[in-house]
Amino acid sequence: MTGKTQARARRALFSASGYHGTGILLAVFFLAPFAITILSSFRHGTEARLPPVPPWPTNGVSLDAYRSLDSFGAGVWQHTLNSAAVAIGTALLTVAVSLLAGYGFSRYRFKFKNALFVLIIATLMIPFQSILTPLFIILAKLGLNNSLIGLTLVYVTLQLPFSVFMMRNAFDAVPKEIEEAARIDGARDLGLLIRVLLPLVLPGIVTVAIFAFLNSWNEFLAALVLLSDNSKFTLPILISAVRAGRLGAIDWGAVQAGVTVMSVPCLFVFLLLQRYYMRGLMTGAVK
Amino acid sequence: MKISKLLAAASLVTFCFAAGAAQAETLQMWVRSGIGASFTKLVEAYNGSHDDKIQMTEVPFSELVQKYATAIAGGQAPDALSLDLIYNPAFAAADQLEDLTDWAKALPYFASLSPSHVKLGTFEDKIYGLPLSVETSVFAWNKDLYKKAGLDPDKAPTTWEEISANAAKIRAISDDTYGFYFSGGGCGGCMIFTFTPLTWGAGADILSEDGKTATIDTPQMRKAIGYYRDMVKAGVVPPGAASDTGTNFLSITNGKIGQQNLGAFAIGTLVTEHPDIHFGVSLIPSVDGKTSSFAGGDNFVITKGSPRAAIAKNFLEYAYSLEGQKVMAKYGSLPTRSDIAAEVLKDLDPRMQVGVDAIAVAKTPYTLQFNDLINSANGPWASFTNAAIFGDDVDGAFATAQEEMQGIIDNAQ
Amino acid sequence: MTLADSLSPSPRRHRPKRRSQWKGVLYIAPAMALVIVFFILPVLFTFWMSLHKWPLIGASSFIGLRNYVRMFSDTRFYSALGFTAYYTVIITIAIFALAFPLAIFVERQRRMVGVYRTAIFMPVVVGLASASLLWVWFGNVDSGFLNPLLAWLGLVDPKSNFFASFDSAFVVICVMVVWKVAGFTMIILLTGLQAIPTELGEAARIDGANRWKRFIYVTLPLMRKTMALSLILSVTGSILAFDQFYIMTAGGPQNKMITVVYYIFNQSFVSFNLGYGAAMSLVLLAILVLISIFQLWLLRVGEDRP
């Protein structure tokens, strides 16, 4: 009897250590690149072209890499602000548009509903690189080219298939009875949507917002083609200038700083909101 | 209440500023990033002494042409552009540039402007582009490494046998010194600039005179490829060269590279940014010992129909003045006017003169398909240089390049 | 067949719908406006362009279907298709080979599981461009991290340049993509695993099925829908791959890493053959629509909902 318990305990211990060993190895594999890049970006400018061994500053901490990054384009703050404006704008607008559309698709019946839904989802299938020129021309006709607003509208459109799909599923998951009860209490239309249903689909909203934020924060090609002013460029364009090198030499320190500036906000937003994010993603996937 | 008043006042102030600024006009101009500080300094000097302003936007060099073309398509092009001169024929042929013929010919110094640039700026006898910056390719060597390798630091090698032998000696100095460098990872622009002079000087070219036939497979080209292959095989070229798509074009600045072909603007960069590197400059020897060079740089073009063409011309005249030429030369751009070149370079590094000398022996290919054939990272020339120098099948590389280049030329007819 | 089903108007139910008809349309109007202006119009315009010889600058001329005919004899287009297919197959297998064990690993509620899940998911949230840039530095022969690491492990020569040959460059890119995407696939698969009622596994265990058999006969069949979703997301994403090859190898040694989107990009924005690029985009679109119909059928998106 005791022998059996001991064996079981030993096996549990063994499996636990195996489990955590694997877990730690995995965590290292997935996190180490970030850690190495972030730590390396604080090395002295003179060390920038050396391999990161060891991957932390050995000659004291220095901001050389960030100073070098700042000397590209209109300065790193300006580009960060542009990116933040576009990313936050895209997130808010995407939430507003897809909330309404998701509600419409989930709760109402109208002609060609399914066809329209499929149409929105179908935008996912087009490599948008191939429609950039028409997009540029349309934006120019609307007077929205070389503007962060125009870029934001394009990004919102790119986000719609995923977001509308997500929000429709979120509304589908809300029991009809709640709505009926609210209707009896006199809530109607937008009021009903905002006061009663909004809290219930909040995880979906947060998911949509985070995806929109991250994707527009990171997008490169459309930004490059649609913007033409130094002062309006977003971060990825700054980074591409760094990658292209200056005076025939690439400054790896500035690359590390650039990757850090690009990724840290993403990681931060994710860590802050990951419970909503995961919940939203998982309910979306199940449907 | 207060806040809204404040806002109103602020917007009024902004409005006044805007109205005040509207009297002097602002010219929108694009330049490619990575060409060095000379143009930025020129714009600063101009803006400091004129009422009209130039607003300069730096566009990543790899995307400039695409962006400009897209902007034209959308009717949102800048007023003027510093255009890599090799693209000048294509843009002129597409009828997108302002005709400058009469104005240009009236310039008193027109005849002394860099001939390659004017040739590339001319399409069907009309002038659409004028030289803004001149850039030639030259051979450079690190004098300190020459000394350490037991070579005479003041004697320029004149044959590729000599260069290869020197490279081996420099490689032997230590584990991290290398004898030679080039951007071999499919950088068509780098290789046409630094490598084709090896064959040009010996009388060969990769395109026929009229640009209608690809002529890549010549004994001279085979010989040139052979020198580079042997150096790679001997391990005197850093391994990174095989995948460098042009981002580390100036590796010599790290002080570990013994010899390299580079652009004359690098002389300015080396002098101002890396004063610790002692280097010599000479013309690039070809495979038979004669010298050659590539005349590159930018032409100044004005977008067709720009309402601010007068300012653009005014600005260009400033660039051609002694003052303007001096500002540019100080930051590494060669003089575009040969009549005042000596005066412009008077107080500057004597090595700049080598770059000017190169203009006399330099060539520039004239083709409307320059981008597709040569400059594109995925074009036949770029892949040829990589495949022939680093690959296993040299004959195959020649055959593929010949076929693909001819195909592109034929398709465009 | 399925598409036709989903396109046919939904059967009317008993409640009068006239009023809510226009209301529903009103709710989806902003989304539709954006999609029409920034998607449908550009696509129609792309179709129009595909019938023209359309240089990026200068005048265009109508040439009918010649752009489509040209595609059939364009060997570079074929090799782009070939490489895209090759990449899609390899990367999808690689992602699944890692993501499935990961999903099983993080499924059970144990101490620290949340931490591991988060760690594995972190690369998903940074951009592909940033990730590519990070790994291009990592793999750089002079300044990177992979070289010293692998040389220390005795696996490679310290001076080997990973991006110089196709095979090693391809491996580095695949490792980067798997690193970046595995967490996402893992979460999708995890939702599938968690949706399986535990009683089923218990019942199978009582019947004497071992762990492997339970996985094959109970878990996998019930995961069909989830697998289809993640499979198709991965396949679609891989077919549209562009950034990693553009940033990390600029098309790879001797253009061996040109994907279809890369080729379209080159034709449109480097060679300025916008008409030809547009025609190829539409062919690519057709390929993806076929896959999407398959997806819609598997996931029953078109199914009528209450």
Image (cartoon, helix red, strand yellow):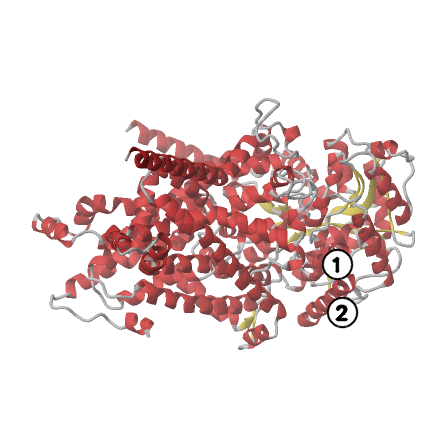
Judged from the image, the secondary structure of the residue bearing numbered disc 2 is loop
Chain name for mark 2: B
- Residue C181 lies left or right of residue C84; in this view the side is left
Front one among A25 and B357: A25
Three-letter amino acid code at the position of disc 1: Asp
Q: Which residue is mark 1?
A: B392
Q: Residue furthest top?
A: A60
> At label 2, which amino acid type do we have?
Lys
- As helix, strand or loop, the secondary structure at mark 1 comes to loop
| Above/below status of A60 relative to C101 | above
Question: From where the camera sits, is residue B15 visible?
Answer: no
Residues flagged by tags 2 and 1 on a common chain: yes
Q: Is residue A148 visible?
A: yes
Residue at 39 percent of width and 39 percent of height = A15
Residue C163 in percent (x, y) is at: 64, 49
Lower position in the chain sequence, tag 2 or tag 1: 2
Place residue A21 in its image quadrant.
Answer: top left
Residue A103 appears left or right of B153:
left
Relative image position of residue B286 (x, y in whole percent): 87, 52
Q: Nearer the viewer, residue B290 or A276?
A: A276
Q: Which residue is mark 2?
A: B212
